[in-house]
Image (cartoon, helix red, strand yellow):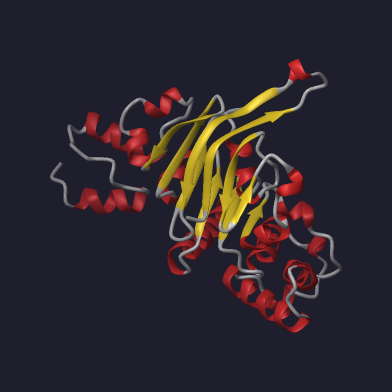
Amino acid sequence: MAISFHEVDHDYSGLRKKDDVKALFDINLNIESKDEFIAVVGKTGSGKSTLVSHMNALILPTKGNIKIFDYVITPKKRKNPKLKEIRKRIGFVFQFPEYQLFEETVLKDIMFAPKNFGFSEEEAKTRALEACKLLGIDKDLLEKSPFALSGGQMRKVAIAGILAYNPDILLLDEPTRGLDPKTAIEVMKIFAKINKEYHKTIVMITHDMNLVYEYATRVIAMKDGKIFFDGKSIDLFKDDTYKKCNLVKPDILDLVDYLNTSLNLDLDYNVKNEEELLVRLKGVSL
């Protein structure tokens, strides 16, 4: 087990003790080190960002403990291990990672994290070039300033900086926020490839239920600081469970519902996108 929460609470401190805000309640959760693609969903303030921030010890629990690989994170700061080792194994792609770009060139920016985690200059460069290849970053861009790139290119460079040190698990905070539709699809296909071909576990915070249904193999739905649902996306949306978490049904499932009602069909929810639905419809007598 890569990440294991045991009876975890988290409180955010107010100006006075009575103003403290409890963000997580009694969280028990296990995440595997390989092959999971998890979407963490819930309305604003449900606790999803706080939950994911604990997964590489960006914040510490107020109560309980979290085992991250061989390290145990507790509320007592002095007793916690070297957090750098945890963050080397669990990479966090923030909501606007391009805001973290600061080096003179694209290549230097991508090399920064591997060098920071102890890789040599030569190895950091090799890893950076491999990440660029995976993300489709043109070699002609490597000596340019990252601030001369388009928004989509900047996002890819920022992600490449995380992939270059090859963490075991990727945490993604709204990975397509602010991207145009074409670039958003490209980025999600890259993460899907990393999950399927490199067997890395991915944990993604998102408000986009279309992304959840198409890519996630497991959904954790948060409500009022607690885990309300943990299971397959099809089970979240086939009844009213998603409504109880103030979520909306993915567009593809609305389309399935419409076709079933208007054409008297009996299609199930085992379709992830329009392409899969079209394949299904070819075998249906209308």
Which corner quadrant of the image does residue 264 belong to? top left
Residue 234 percent coordinates (x, y) = 33, 40
Q: Report how many numbered discs are placed on residues in the image.
A: 0
Image height of 143 relative to 183, above or below: below
Query: 185 or 243, which lies in front?
Result: 243
Q: Residue at 84% of width from left, 65% of height from top? A: 103
Q: Is 270 placed left or right of 50 in the picture?
A: left
Q: Which residue appears farthest toward the bottom when viewing the image?
A: 122
Residue 165, position in %: x, y? 66, 69
Q: In which quarter of the image is the C terminus?
A: top left
Which residue: 80% across, 72% down?
108
Residue pushed farthest top?
18
Front residue (pair 195, 180): 195
- Relative to 62, say whether 143 is above or below: below
Q: Can residue 44 be seen in this view?
A: no
Q: Name, please, the residue furthest toward the left.
A: 285
Rendered residue at 55%/24% (across/down): 224
Front in this rendered view, residue 286 or 172? 172
Q: Residue 284: where, in percent of width, then height? A: 16, 47
- Does residue 270 show up? yes
Residue found at the very far right of the displayed protein: 104
**Point 76% across, 80% down: residue:** 120
Left or right, residue 158 beside residue 169 = right
Up/down of 81 relative to 252, above or below: below
Residue 273 in percent (x, y) is at: 37, 49
